[in-house]
Amino acid sequence: MPATKRSDYVSAISVRNVTRSYDGGVEALRGVSIEIQEGRVTALLGRSGCGKTTLLNLCGAMDFPSSGEVLIEGHSTTALDDARLTSLRRGTIGFVFQAFQLLPSLTALENVELPLLLAGTKGSEARAREILRWVGLEEKASALPFQLSGGQMQRVAVARALVHQPKLLIADEPTGNLDTQSGDQVLALLRRAADEFGAAVVIATHSAEAAAMADIRVRMRDGRIQGIESGGSEPGFAQ
Ligand SMILES: Nc1ncnc2c1ncn2[C@@H]1O[C@H](COP(=O)(O)OP(=O)(O)OP(=O)(O)O)[C@@H](O)[C@H]1O
Ligand SMILES: [Mg+2]
């Protein structure tokens, strides 16, 4: 099933002819251009070191291009001051990491609620409970991370990433530490984030299952995009 019936997908992120060089001369990205679309799952694929995490960090405004530009909802990330970058990261983007990165001394519910507390959002506990229910873990609200399985921890992390209803959900190897069954549950949630919330979901992954459930597969090699395949019934996805 395609994510939506629309054929006029809206770009949440535009990556335009971007390079990224690290100190020491590594050219992690070399002339990358891609549109990341709302309501669709985009998978970044390719060998270790090909530039997936680097591209994700640029898409999440955690890092900046050496040349070219990244536009998030029409705003070039390099043109934003610190206050606007912070509000972009807190308001518009959700992150999921391979190693979950839950705070060990907070319960599942508190971990999920934390971004709302930092942003000063009212009704944060009720909202955190609601999204914890959405990931199927309401009964684990009071559990500490060490009392959860890896799959459960990652579902809490997905809830935390979605609690503020971000337009972009960025996931770096979200199933890398999980068994197949737990990984599939997490992938199903990422799929639903695109389908139900209309989020632009971008996943860097080595997993065949994650690649299979994506709408768009971006094959990278040596810092370049080798090819883009659209898995749905929407042909003509142009770079
Ligand atoms: N902070 C850094 N400083 C210097 N070089 C870096 C830095 N981060 C990444 N690199 C280099 O940039 C290139 C791309 O790395 P990146 O982490 O984006 O790859 P990746 O596709 O995510 O790999 P993996 O599948 O192993 O996660 C690699 O050659 C890497 O060694
Ligand atoms: Mg990586």
Image (cartoon, rainbow, N blue to C red):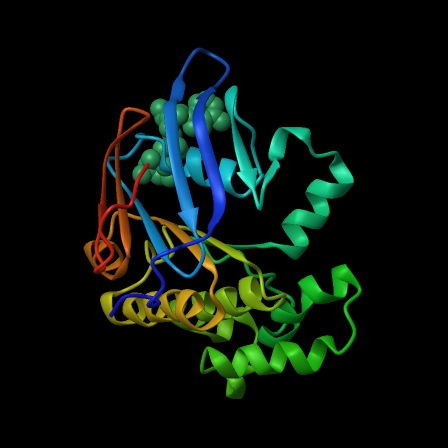
Q: Residue at x 49, y 80 (%)?
A: 134
The percent position of residue 199, horizontal first and vertical second, equals: 48, 61
Identify the image quadrant of residue 178: bottom left
Give the tally of numbered discs.
0
The percent position of residue 175, horizontal first and vertical second, equals: 33, 58
Quadrant hosting ligand 2: top left
Q: Residue at x 45, y 82 (%)?
A: 136
The percent position of residue 174, horizontal first and vertical second, equals: 38, 56
Q: Residue at x 52, y 33 (%)?
A: 70
- The front one of 122 and 39 is 39
Q: Name above or below for residue 14 compared with residue 167.
A: above
Question: Residue most toward the bottom?
Answer: 139
The percent position of residue 56, horizontal first and vertical second, equals: 45, 41
Residue 142 makes an appearance in the image = no
Task: Tell me if 44 is positioned left or right of 107 in this view.
Answer: left
- The front one of 156 and 231 is 231
Task: Tell me if 163 is positioned left or right of 189 in this view.
Answer: right
Residue 185 makes an appearance in the image = yes
Identify the image quadrant of residue 105: bottom right
- Say which quadrant the N terminus sits in: bottom left
- The front one of 178 and 216 is 216
- The front one of 122 and 148 is 122
Q: Name above or below for residue 229 compared with residue 117.
A: above
- Say which quadrant the C terminus sits in: top left
Q: Name above or below for residue 16 compared with residue 91.
A: above
